[in-house]
Amino acid sequence: MTPNRFYCSALDECRVALGKLSIFNLWYFKKQLSMQLIVSKERQVERLHQEKMYLTSEVKKLEKQKSELLDIDEDSMGFGDLW
């Protein structure tokens, strides 16, 4: 079986990359990746916090509207004595 040129060039590139690989490089890339993940999570937490605050205010508005509608319903139907 004759060797494929693509596989040979891919193997050569892998050998060069492995030759450049060192413990320091692994540690450095791991550190960079973890820092990027932390920054990404902080942005996500901030966005989710703002969304939670907005939804909380919407729930309060809806609860207030509900209570007002229940008060109007009781007054208009004359069932205030039954409740």
Image: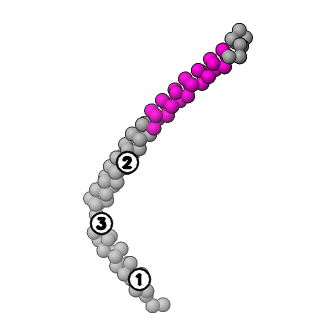
Instruction: Name the residue tied to disc 1.
Output: 6
Quarter holding residue 30: bottom left
Return the mark for residue 25: none
Number of other residues with Cα within 10 Å of mark 3, as a class: few under 14, some 14 to 19, many 20 or more? few
Q: In which quarter of the image is residue 62?
A: top right
Mark 3 and mark 1 lie on one chain; the one further toward the N terminus is 1
What residue is drawn where x is 28% and y is 60%?
Answer: 25
Eye-nearest disc, 3 or 1: 1
* Local SS, label 2: helix
* Residue assigned mark 2: 40
| Nearest to the observer: residue 2 or residue 77 | 77
Q: Which of marks 2 and 1 is nearer the N terminus?
A: 1
State the image coordinates of residue 56 (x, y, percent, origin top left): 49, 30
Name the amino acid, label 3: Leu
> Which label lies toward us, 3 or 2?
2
Whether residue 27 is visible, yes or no, is no
Q: Is the magenta stretch mostly helix, strand or loop?
A: helix
- Which of the two discs, 3 and 2, labels the residue nearer the N terminus? 3
Residue 45 on the magenta span = no
Residue identified by numbered label 3: 21
